[in-house]
Amino acid sequence: MLSEEFLCIIPAKGTSNRLKRKNIAMLNGKPLIAYAIDAAKKTGIFKEIFVSTEDDEIKRIAEDYGAIVPYIRPEYLSKDPAGVVEVCLHMINYLEGIGKFYKTLFILLPTSPLRTDADIISALNNFATSDAKVLMSVSEYMHTPFAALKADDRGYLSPYFPKLINLKSQKMPKAYICNGAVTILDITEFKMQKNYHFYPMASYIMPWERSIDVDNEIDLKFAEFIMKVGTE
């Protein structure tokens, strides 16, 4: 199923606010980014797997695990307000400048270490059978957002969704949150939109236990716990 139409980009900056150098934080004996690279390799659909980083250590680790880091990206792309969109558009422009053209982009964030190669393939199948130009992997909210309360200046509470607040949770509409594990985009449309939040948006629904997004030390420990439980 190897296709030269598929471009895989793993964005991995060196700085982070809540967990120091989280993209290479160690999880069960491997740096976080290694899980994204390994999952991409196991799919068998990518001729090359690209990592975008401004960090020399991340470059070395990514290459050790079989990814390609074609350049050290400009520092401004690793600081606000630049984000994943700008990083990926920069990589696409670079690759097209050296004669590499692709039809479909896969963005795999290093912070989703429990995503599997099967998740990537299943997401691709959903994307391929849809009319959408973008797909995002999601998971169902563990606690319904429709029961959320807001507080005024006096600390008095009121519901955000007053028409739903008295419903039992199982009667409330299902709601989903993007988990960052897999984003798939039509590159032509992505270059026009310069965003990946456009609609219609296809989905790939993942269970919560594979949807952990590592943002702090507790997330990291929880991911390690889930991995340990899954092997027992």
Image (spheres, rainbow, N blue to C red):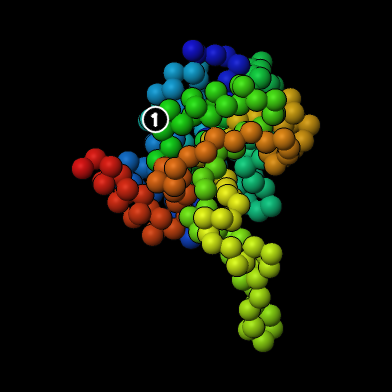
Q: Position of residue 166 (x, y in %)?
A: 60, 67
164 left or right of 138? right
150 or 33: nearer the viewer = 150
Please give the name of the residue rendered at 74% of the width and 25% of the height, measured from the top-left corner.
188
Q: Is residue 100 above or below residue 72?
A: above
Q: In the rendered image, which quarter is residue 157 located in?
A: bottom right
Q: Position of residue 93 (x, y in %)?
A: 69, 28
In the orientation shown, which residue stands out farthest toward the bottom? 154
Q: Is residue 191 above or below residue 23?
A: above
**Badge 1: residue crowd in 10 Å (few <14, some 14–19, many ≥20):** some
Q: Position of residue 182 (x, y in %)?
A: 53, 35
226 or 221: nearer the viewer = 226
Please give the name of the residue rendered at 46% of the width and 31% of the height, measured from the top-left corner.
119
104 left or right of 19? right
33 left or right of 149? left
Kindly tell me whether residue 90 is visible in this rendering: no
In the orientation shown, which residue stands out farthest toward the left? 232
User: Which residue position is annotated with label 1?
Assistant: 38
Please give the name of the residue rendered at 69% of the width and 52% of the height, measured from the top-left corner.
81
38 left or right of 206? left
Tell me the amino acid under the disc marked 1.
Asp
